[in-house]
Image (cartoon, rainbow, N blue to C red):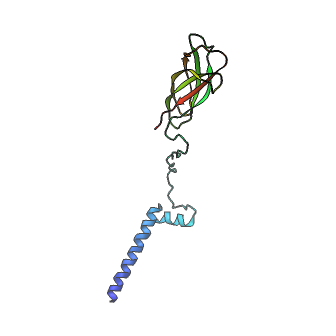
């Protein structure tokens, strides 16, 4: 029985030494000088100098916006490029990509007679050119009204953003 107890003590002692060596290796202690330096906190004469610190890999910021992984244009401004005549109404707009990726879309310009609640009298669709994230681009086209325009007219732009 005493012999069995001695074996158990040796197994326990070996397990303790193995654990200590594993922990030392995990914390970068490869010899007694390293251990002494780490315990004293001085870096000691026998301590080995480590190489320059390895920078952490860049972590991408998680996308928390409304348009994660999508192109999304917003209208910066729209205008008539000259007067409306029998040859049409030239229009243009500037559009900012506020999505998280580069891309393109399209825009439909519409003319309404009177104010924004008046009847639609013409429209045209134009591609919005490829733009980087936060890029601003211009799109234009010519609207050919379905009737003679008199009085006030109102211009709107509706962006057709891609989804997915």
Quadrant containing the N terminus is: bottom left
Residue 104 pos. (x, y %): 49, 29
Residue 161 pos. (x, y %): 51, 32
**Is residue 78 rendered to the left or right of residue 59?**
right
Residue positioned 34% across, 89% down in the render: 2
Residue 135 pos. (x, y %): 56, 30
Residue positioned 63% across, 27% down in the render: 117
In this picture, is 30 found above or below 120? below
Residue 134 pos. (x, y %): 57, 33
Viewer-proximal residue, 88 or 100?
88
In this picture, is 14 found above or below 143? below
Residue that extends furthest to the top in the rendered view of this protein: 86
In this picture, is 76 found above or below 149? below
Viewer-proximal residue, 103 or 42?
103
Viewer-proximal residue, 70 or 151?
151
**Image quadrant where residue 119 sits:** top right
**Image quadrant where residue 65 sits:** top right
**Is residue 11 rendered to the left or right of residue 73?**
left
Residue positioned 58% across, 26% down in the render: 157
Viewer-proximal residue, 78 or 51?
78
């Amino acid at each position: 029985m005493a012999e069995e107890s001695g074996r158990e003590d040796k197994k326990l002692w070996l397990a303790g030494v193995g654990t200590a060596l594993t922990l030392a290796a995990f914390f970068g202690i490869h010899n007694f000088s390293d251990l002494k330096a780490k315990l004293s906190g001085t870096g000691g004469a026998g301590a080995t100098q480590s190489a320059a610190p390895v920078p952490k890999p860049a972590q991408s910021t998680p996308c928390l916006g409304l348009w994660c992984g999508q192109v999304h244009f917003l209208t910066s401004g729209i205008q008539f490029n000259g007067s409306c005549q029998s040859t049409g109404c030239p229009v243009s707009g500037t559009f900012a990509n506020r999505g998280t990726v580069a891309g393109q879309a399209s825009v439909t310009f519409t003319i309404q007679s009177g104010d924004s609640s008046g009847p639609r009298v013409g429209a045209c669709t134009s591609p919005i050119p490829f733009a980087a994230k936060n890029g601003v681009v211009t799109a234009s086209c010519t609207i050919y009204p379905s009737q003679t325009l008199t009085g006030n007219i109102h211009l709107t732009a509706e962006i057709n953003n891609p989804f997915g």
